[in-house]
Amino acid sequence: MKSNIFILFPAFTSTSFARTLYESYTFDPLEHLAGIAPYFEPQDPPRNPSPPQGCNVTQAAYLVRHAAINANDFDYEEYLEPFIQKHQNHSNVNWVIVPELAFLRDWMPPQLTEQELVTRTGRLQSAQLGVTISYKYPNLRLPQRVWTSTAERTVKSAEGLIRGLELDDNQIDMVQVYEGKQAGANTLTPYSSCPAYSSSAGSKQSSQYQSLYSAPIISRLNALAPDFNFTADDIFAMQELCGYETVIRGSSPFCSLDLFSPDEWLSFEYANDIMYHYNTGYGNPISGVIGFPWLNATLNLLTSTTPANSQDLYISFTHRELPPTVLVAMGLFNNIQFSPGSDINATMPLDQINYNRAWVSSYVLPFLSNIAIEKMDCSQNYYVKSQLANNGSSSATDGSTFYRVMVNDAPQTLPDCHDGPAESCSASGLQSYLAGRAAMFEGFSERCNVSYSNSTDNLGQWNDGWKEVV
């Protein structure tokens, strides 16, 4: 006997269904501003930041970029100041007839007479990061020292974090580390002492894509306000002001999605991604060489049974150039990780966006971006516990020690070392991993073409050789 079964669906029209889907879409420009994005935690990938079940963090080392500043010197001189001057010289433009630009009639630029200053937002977020770290590791001792390079923005950021960490004043010492051009690898700014590194690397490639994506925006805005004569640099300045003005004033009219669409913000982000790819990313053959000394020193510290300065937490502050080079040294956020042998530069085309790329600077390099390496005791993890029982052992030195990397509180899987709980790296696997990275990136002095005397290939961090620089 044949049975007829009817399934009733809600009476959606195609139009209402499409509208429902569209209305669920949200976009925040502040999460797509590359190196000037206010600190956020994108959870890329969206994994649980808590330690794997049955694992406890016993030590951790952090590398932190300085907090939000009012403007980078280059950005100010190249984009912001010219746009601000141009705006002030075009007081005759009738902005009020253009809804998305009407704010420019009364807009006053933020105070940028002196650049590179940590903003109130930056100081607050530094302190918040300190509080977050203290809550994240309740069983770890507060650090005796926090290290920082000597620039005011890194020092102020370190001071903010220390305030967030401390229960009482003056518990934690701050050690300032020399930022010289002849320090070899023994510094928190090794790119400055690497002659093979050029701070302008990536500008040419980024400018090529910048000209491409800004062309239709220029046409649109010039049609609305022809007397201003918008240029590619103006567009870039306005999008940068979204980030800088937000961390100075708390918000910015330049962030409006009526002014720039989500796709136009993604284009701005990609132009920056191209620059960072060739400047401190996989497109620069010296990147991993610059980042390896910190990785090597940190892993040696966390695997040592007798570190020079025994702390549970090791935290250092640096500038935006170092964290991405460390990620390259680690092999993380690599566009061709799962297809080795490909041309890495081909993954960052200059005529269209690679939306599937792993290298997204907003995710790895916002203000206050941080890389953490955690040492974990996983003796209570069910799988590890059973393995130890089968081997007749139970101590951490017998195979229950594992390591994992966090970037802005998102767990990352190290290439070629993911044999532990939640793809963490075993102590034995870590040695092989580090040897492999050393084979690719060690030899700082030679590969940086160092010609000055007394260079070193090693970072002497956390030992008594690093004294405070006043």
Image (tube, rainbow, N blue to C red):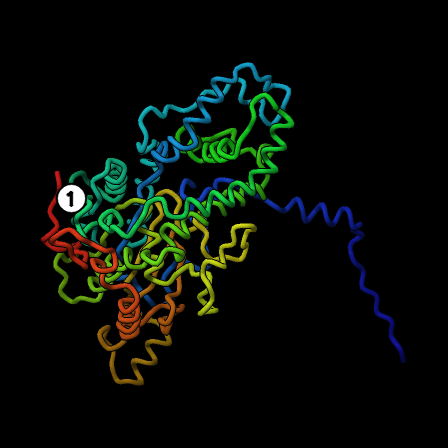
Quadrant placement of the C terminus: top left
Could you tell me residue 220's position as x and y percent?
63, 32
* Left or right side of 187 for 285: right
Q: Which residue is mark 1?
A: 173
19 in relation to 444, above or below: above
Depicted 23 relative to depicted 303: above or below: above
Q: How many marks?
A: 1
Using the image as rendered, state which of residue 466 and residue 128 is in the foreground.
466
- Describe residue 260's horizontal placement relative to residue 111 as left or right: right
Amino acid found under the numbered disc labelled 1:
Asp
Could one spot residue 131 in this view of the protein?
no
- Residue drawn where x is 23% and y is 54% of the image: 313
- Say whether residue 325 is left or right of residue 80: left
In-image side of 126 versus 78 (left or right) = left
Q: Residues within 10 Å of mark 1 (few under 14, many from 20)?
A: some
Q: At 23% from the left edge and 55% from the top edge, which residue is drawn?
A: 449
x, y percent for residue 370: 33, 50
Horizontal and vertical percent for residue 105? 54, 18
Q: Nearer the viewer, residue 343 or 140?
A: 343
